[in-house]
Amino acid sequence: MANNVKETEAELVLPWHSEVGDLLAQAAILCIAHGLDVDTFMKGAWSAYIEARPGLKNRLEEIKLRNQLDEIRRNGRMGLA
């Protein structure tokens, strides 16, 4: 009997990607119900993702800065540093 209970519980557990999809769908429904546009939803989702990963925001800012510096150098507006 105990094995049947464990199997039933295991069947009820969704894969992580299904759970994420369900949560995103619920968030989207709430946003729509409160009149938020898709851009606001996407910005909120992106912010939540960034905040959930310590250090990612700093890493992305560093990459952006390096790309900007590379572009300035390519355009001859700054010497090599």
Image: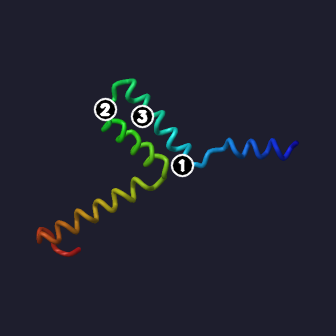
Residue projecting furthest to the top:
34
Q: Is residue 8 left or right of residue 63?
A: right
Q: Earlier in the sequence, mark 3 or mark 1?
A: 1
Residue 73: quarter of image: bottom left
In the rendered structure, find residue 37 and report the number of the disc placed on it: 2
Residue 42 placed where, x, y %?
36, 41
Q: Which residue is mark 1?
A: 17
Q: Is 14 in front, or is 47?
A: 14
Q: Earlier in the sequence, mark 3 or mark 2?
A: 3
In the rendered structure, find residue 77 and report the number of the disc placed on it: none
As measured in the structure, the alpha-carbon distance from the residue carrying label 2 to the one carrying label 1 is 24 Å
Q: Is residue 81 above or below residue 31?
A: below
The quarter of the image holding the C terminus is: bottom left
Q: Is residue 71 above or below residue 11?
A: below
Q: Is 20 in front, or is 45?
A: 20
Q: Which residue is mark 3?
A: 28
Q: Amino acid at mark 1?
A: His
Q: Amino acid at mark 3?
A: Ala
Name the residue at 17% across, 66% down: 72
Q: Amino acid at mark 2?
A: Asp
